[in-house]
Amino acid sequence: MFDFTEVNPMAINFLYPNYEVERNYDRCISCRACERQCANEVHEYLPDQNKMVCDDSKCVNCQRCVSICPTRALKIVKTNNTYKENANWTGKAINEVYRQAGSGGVLLSSMGNPENYPVYFDKILLNASQVTNPSIDPLREPMETKVFLGAKPKAIERDARGRIVNNLPPHLSLSMPVMFSAMSFGSISYNAHESLARAAEELGIMYNTGEGGLHEDFYRYGKNTIVQVASGRFGVHPDYLNSGAAIEIKMGQGAKPGIGGHLPGAKIIGDVSRTRMIPEGTDAISPAPHHDIYSIEDLRQLVYSLKEATEYKKPVIVKIAAVHNVSAIASGIARSGADIIAIDGFRGGTGAAPTRIRDHVGIPIELALASVDRRLREEGIRDNVSLVVGGSIRSSADIVKAVALGADCVYIATSALLALGCHLCGSCHTGKCNWGIATQNPELVKRLNPNLGYKRLVNLLTAWKHEIKEMMGGMGINSIESLKGNRLMLRGVGLNEKELEILGIKYAGE
Amino acid sequence: MKKVYVNEKWCLGCHLCEYYCAFAGTNEKDMARALKDIKINPRIRIEEKDGVSFAVSCRHCDEPLCVKGCITGALTRKDGVITINKDKCVSCYTCILCCPFGAIAPSEQGAVQKCELCVKSAAGTPACVKGCPNGAIVFEERG
């Protein structure tokens, strides 16, 4: 990589800052809270003038200063500095060329794909009962949102005296069809993990360790924990596998299908190093593939190795990214002995991914889900597994639509981080998260107080549960199980024949 | 009784408690109007060194040295809250010398000032507690 600034420190800067910090000097009281709370050092106090000034070029638009300013003196606006208008060469496209011409490096991004691809959830509408089939009022009548994840027994078995034998494979029991998806300790902070773990416990759902091992302090939340085994195998040992309620094998991630992970050595310090079981300062590199898995048969070996290690007491989840032939892959996984398949759509988040991969690889989760559910039903193996989908579930309506498209449960992560304060600035990879979420800097980590954070997560999902019940009640359905795969409750708008066919739904008015 | 307690583990050193305290002492509705171009003199102050920070305000001691030392009876303890009667205070600053926490300070109005748990200005939760962005300052009953 050739850095021009080494030869000519005054080289022309091709990049104009994306954002401008607008300060209303009539309202600014120079309390310096913005300056103290900005890890990017945008704000500065001039004591001789008793005045705050800013350097816009450092701003990532995380909104921390805006949120904390006691007099609402700040706002961040998109710069109106403009290149000559060009529908093909947008300002963003031009800037990315400038950045790479300056750095010689791969562009990195964080959080989910922000590009303008169709959001199928927004083109699907729900049904409601009128006249001939009564709707149900969830405030007056019982309404069941509980779900069980895992393989279903093939047949009823009886012993010699005719009594039913309990042949139920290991299951996860959830109070509602939502779980927090994998985010490793390392990619997110200790306090973020604690918030997720405590919220999962209070809500009766699961959170997921991600590939970073499980911090010793969090073993107590074991019955609400899914422990992950990924290609780097970081932090995996017998106690870890046995500490959780389920084990997840991560084959892929929606934000970066086909790509591994790389947590820089700078973040492998203290507890992170101990939890990952690697020396301090070493890069944690998760290879793109599992080097021992090149076929469904290989996957089956790992599934059974993990079951053997945990005495067949825990369901095994296999997580894959939604890619072109996802239904064929899912069909293989459903025959591999896995109990649950998790599919991550192309809008799923990440702590760091190459921009081109994040923005151009994978397929929408709605289409992947509908196609996998149909394929498994057609092949008569749908009951071998439960389906969990993630990759931008933004609201309770998305959950209801996902369940009606055939999902048993959804994974949420971005919406959980939003509840904790994330403003989707997409700079997780810089490690300077001003909200104390995607950072290991102790000064920043303490900004997320889990006593407040876990309550916000509990609030969010409690609200969503109420909304799910309202929507189910409107459709005259009193159990989430009756909604599962119930495509008659869905109608499409603005979709073409092919899209309707893949989703397996009718057009509005049909 | 309920008192203000600070957990330095969650204190971010943002100093907002000081500004909310100063604002609570004014009768303005709008913080910008109240504190614009003013050097504040709050009754709670952030102490910080080597990455540790926490807010300090009156502890409302069970055996308050300030009340014992007060030569005019301006400082009194009622229902556990120590308050200052500005009309009686002669600004001898004995209380400032007595207080082991440095929680009493001279005020611009020619008397001393201290945290009175917002009993005189706002009902309910003290302003510093309400304004703390990270739940580091709490108002609670402790044994």
Image (tube, grey):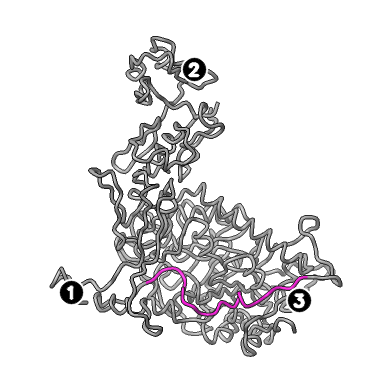
Crowding near the residue tagged with mark 1, few <14, some 14–19, many ≥20 C-alpha atoms within 10 Å: some
Q: Secondary structure at mark 3?
A: loop
Q: Position of residue A503 (x, y in %)?
A: 64, 83
Which dot marks residue B77? 2
Magenta range is A109-128
- Residues tagged by mark 3 and mark 2 found on one chain of the structure: no
The question of residue A116 being in magenta is answered with yes
- What type is the residue that disc 2 sits on? Arg
Location of the N terminus of chain A by quadrant is: bottom left
Answer few, some or many: residues within 10 Å of disc 2's Cα (few below 14, many 20 plus, some between 14 and 19): some
Extreme-right residue of the structure: A132
Please identify the residue farthest to the left as the structure is shown.
A7
Chain name for mark 1: A
Q: CA distance from mark 3 to mark 2?
A: 76 Å
Tell me which numbered mark, 1 or 3, is placed earlier along the sequence: 1
* Left or right: residue A208 compared with residue B93: right
Q: Are marks 3 and 2 in contact (CB under 8 Å)?
A: no
Amino acid type at circle 1 is Phe
Which numbered marker is on residue A155? 3
| x and y percentages locating residue A127 in the rendered image | 74, 73
Find out whether residue B38 is within the magenta segment.
Answer: no
Q: Quadrant of residue A188?
A: bottom left
Q: CA distance from mark 1 to mark 2?
A: 69 Å
Q: Is A498 above or below relative to A100?
A: below
What amino acid is labelled 3 in the image? Ala
Q: Which mark is residue A4?
A: 1
Pick whichever, A279 or B33, lies toward us: B33
